[in-house]
Amino acid sequence: MSIRIEDAVGVHMRALGLHMQRSEILAANLANEDTPGFQARDLDFASEMRRHDAVPRFGESSHAQLQYRVASQPSQDGNTVELSVEQAAFSKSASDFQTSLTFLNMKFRGLKQAIEGR
């Protein structure tokens, strides 16, 4: 009997990929804090998870739809990056990434035990 890895790891694989994409986007926002005219972007994690009902296969690329962040206090040069907002979002994203990674580890540990017959 064969096991499809996509079925075994479930939604956690997609969540991990989205967390990685979001971390890259937020890191770019932070790196461009002083760039005139830079528009901060983000993705809506929940809507992206709903948008991809089917878990993509390994090797497939699935890019999230980015949204521009509306600054509560935009700067004079048109930059919409707010350091505290971006740092908080990055911290939460890192925590969520770790949670998804923990779930994947648990899934793989369970699969390993099943293969070993425990």
Image: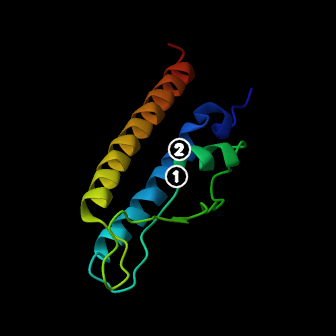
Label 2 sits on residue: 15
Label 1 sits on residue: 18
- Is 69 situated above or below 57? below
What residue type is disc 2 on? Ala
- Residue at (33, 48) in percent of width and height: 94
How far across and how far down the image is residue 105, in percent? 43, 33
- Rendering quarter of residue 101: top left
Comparing 52 with 7, the one in front is: 52
Comparing 41 with 82, the one in front is: 82
- Residue at (38, 82) in percent of width and height: 78
- Residue at (31, 84) in percent of width and height: 35
How far across and how far down the image is residue 77, in percent? 33, 86
Secondary structure of the residue carrying numbered label 1: helix
For the residues marked 1 and 2, what is the alpha-carbon distance in whole angstroms? Answer: 5 Å
Q: Mark 1 touching mark 2, by CB under 8 A?
A: yes
Q: Is residue 92 left or right of residue 53?
A: left
Quarter occupied by the N terminus: top right
- Residue at (46, 64) in percent of width and height: 69
- Quick one: label 1, few (<14), some, or many (20+) residues within 10 Å? many
- Rendering quarter of residue 32: bottom left
How far across and how far down the image is residue 6, in percent? 65, 40
- Rendering quarter of residue 61: bottom right
What residue type is disc 1 on? Leu
